[in-house]
Image: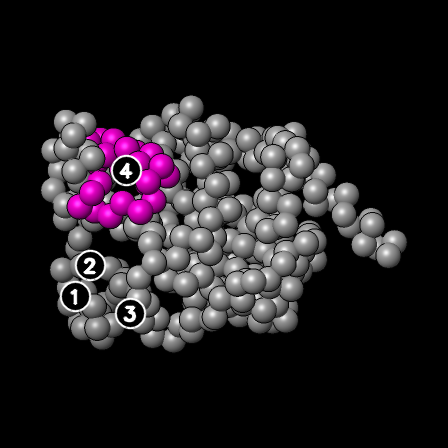
């Protein structure tokens, strides 16, 4: 790390670390209120029309009187961690040292808790700024087992959520994610491999692979996030935590025969133990 108080000049420190000297002096600029408003609207449109790429989103925004270029839309989408989802050839390459694992859920009947867990990250707008929400979800019961908020998309907060879920609820047979760099990193996959958990990753751009997680994000946003304007990360954490507790304990799901995720998850476990 660059140490400005070190006797070695900053120029030589940057050279030794193979980093640009300009980047040492760069001060990140806060995102403008205008961009935050556009990002909020892009998030809403992406929830409704996940197949839309930057060009179509630009056109949709233009029809609403929001003049913005396609490249700027693409930049904001990248910052939000979203992309259009549709079937296309998998031409992407993993980051150096990152292994892509095969998708293990195709044709698999998921009929019990802790058989398959899934994890995903979503963008959460606030009154000023934004955060990212990561959650570990039991595929069978739709129960949110653990979650974390972060101001960056580094792997650390995802790992914390996984470790909490493992400590509280045991371990699944299979853990499914997308191919995001957080989930393909050695630090993240190492936690799963050390616990003898099979790793599954969605096909690139295949919306069907993790569609039920997207449905959960839709519930979180329309029933909680879009109704609020969080003034701080702490307020967002408290309010989202309150909603997820309601989601697990009280909110019935038609896909669960009108049971709550808690009922679908915990009611099955005693039956399995008795059997």
Disc 3 and disc 1: Cα gap in Å? 30 Å
Asked whether the beta carbons under mark 2 and mark 1 sit within 8 Å of each other, the answer is yes
Residue 27, relative to residue 18: is it above or below? above
Q: How is the image coloured?
A: one colour
N-terminal of the pair, mark 1 or mark 4, is: 1
Disc 3 and disc 2: Cα gap in Å? 34 Å
Disc marking residue 42: 4
Disc 2 and disc 4: Cα gap in Å? 32 Å
- Indicate which label's residue lies in the foreground, 3 or 4: 3
Query: In this view of the protein, can residue 2 be seen by the observer?
Result: yes
N-terminal of the pair, mark 3 or mark 1, is: 1
Residue marked by disc 3 = 91
N-terminal of the pair, mark 2 or mark 4, is: 2
Q: Which of the two residues, 21 or 53, is positioned nearer the viewer here?
A: 53
Residue marked by disc 1 = 20
Q: Say what secondary structure mark 2 lies in.
A: helix
Spot occupied by residue 159 in the image (x, y as percentages of width and height): 52, 58
Other-residue count near label 2 (Cα within 10 Å), few / some / many at <14 / 14–19 / ≥20? some
Spot occupied by residue 211 in the image (x, y as percentages of width and height): 47, 48
Name the magenta segment's main secondary structure: helix
N-terminal of the pair, mark 3 or mark 4, is: 4
Disc 3 and disc 4: Cα gap in Å? 26 Å
Disc 1 and disc 4: Cα gap in Å? 33 Å
User: Which quarter of the rendering shows the C terminus?
Assistant: bottom right
Q: Which of the two residues, 176 or 227, is positioned nearer the viewer here?
A: 176
Picture quadrant where residue 118 is located = bottom right
Q: Residue at x 45, y 44 (%)?
A: 214
The residue stretch that appears in magenta: 33-57
Residue marked by disc 2 = 24
Asked whether the beta carbons under mark 1 and mark 4 sit within 8 Å of each other, the answer is no
């Amino acid at each position: 790390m660059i140490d400005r108080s070190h006797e070695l000049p900053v120029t030589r420190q940057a050279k030794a670390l193979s980093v640009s000297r300009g980047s040492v002096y760069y001060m990140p600029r806060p995102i403008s209120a205008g961009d935050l408003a556009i990002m909020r609207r892009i998030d809403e449109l992406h929830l409704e029309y996940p197949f839309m790429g930057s060009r179509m989103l630009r056109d949709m925004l233009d029809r609403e009187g929001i003049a913005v270029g396609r490249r700027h839309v693409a930049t904001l989408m990248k910052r939000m961690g979203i992309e259009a989802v549709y079937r296309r050839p998998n031409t992407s390459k993993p980051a150096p040292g990152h292994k892509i694992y095969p998708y293990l859920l195709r044709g698999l009947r998921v009929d019990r808790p802790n058989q398959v867990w899934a994890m995903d990250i979503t963008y959460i707008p606030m009154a000023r700024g934004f955060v990212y929400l990561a959650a570990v979800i039991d595929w069978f019961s739709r129960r949110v087992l653990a979650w974390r908020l972060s101001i960056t998309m580094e792997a650390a907060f995802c790992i914390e959520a996984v470790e909490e879920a493992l400590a509280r609820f045991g371990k699944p047979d299979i853990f499914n994610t997308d191919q995001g760099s957080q989930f393909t990193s050695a630090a993240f996959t190492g936690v799963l491999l050390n616990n003898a958990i099979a790793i599954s990753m969605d096909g690139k751009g295949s919306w069907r692979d993790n569609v039920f997680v997207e449905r959960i994000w839709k519930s979180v946003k329309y029933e909680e996030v879009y109704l609020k304007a969080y003034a701080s990360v702490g307020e967002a954490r408290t309010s989202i935590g309150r909603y997820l507790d309601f989601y697990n304990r009280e909110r019935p799901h038609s896909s669960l025969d009108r049971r709550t995720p808690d009922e679908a998850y915990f009611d099955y476990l005693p039956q399995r133990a008795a059997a």
